Image: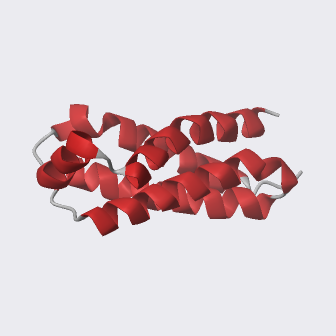
Amino acid sequence: MIHYLLNAFIGKNIIESGLTKVENEGQVGEDFEKEFNVNPNQMKIAGYLEAIGAMLLFASFLGKSFTRIGSIMVGSVMGVAAYKHYKAGHGYEGSKNALKFLGLSALSFASTFNKK
């Protein structure tokens, strides 16, 4: 039961940021592109990966495959996000959220190999 709550927590928090990246509107999108040196297409791809991964984590009660695929998608985006934060000079404080969700998605992925 805790496994599904963890996946729902990750999904709830990640889907919002993913949809924001997909919309990529106005000043927020331009600031993001300049600060992290990514083009709009890369940002949309990251947003789609986050949003789809979050939806798969929401559907994790349907099977382990949903959890595995969703956590890999979310973890890969969060790993790149943490790297981009470090590269932009934000340090640990700037990348704390990305590292938190990277760790949680890795934990979720690892827990699918548990024998029950």
Q: Residue at 59% of width from left, 47% of height from top?
A: 107
Figure check: 42 above or below 75 = below
Residue at the extreme front:
26
**Residue 87 visible in the displayed image:** no
Identify the image quadrant of residue 112: bottom right
- Residue nearest the viewer, comparing 49 with 112: 49
Q: Position of residue 48 (x, y in %)?
A: 49, 60
Q: How is the image coloured?
A: secondary structure
Q: Position of residue 84 (x, y in %)?
A: 22, 54
Q: Residue at 48% of width from left, 47% of height from top?
A: 19
Query: In this image, 105 relative to 91: left or right?
Result: right
Identify the image quadrant of residue 7: top right
Query: In this image, 27 relative to 111: left or right?
Result: left
Q: Residue at 53% of width from left, 35% of height from top?
A: 13
- Residue nearest the viewer, comparing 104 with 25: 25
Identify the image quadrant of residue 41: bottom left
Q: Position of residue 58 (x, y in %)?
A: 71, 45
**Residue 11 visible in the displayed image:** yes
Q: Residue at 58% of width from left, 39% of height from top?
A: 10
The quadrant of the image that shows the N terminus is top right
Q: Position of residue 103 (x, y in %)?
A: 48, 45
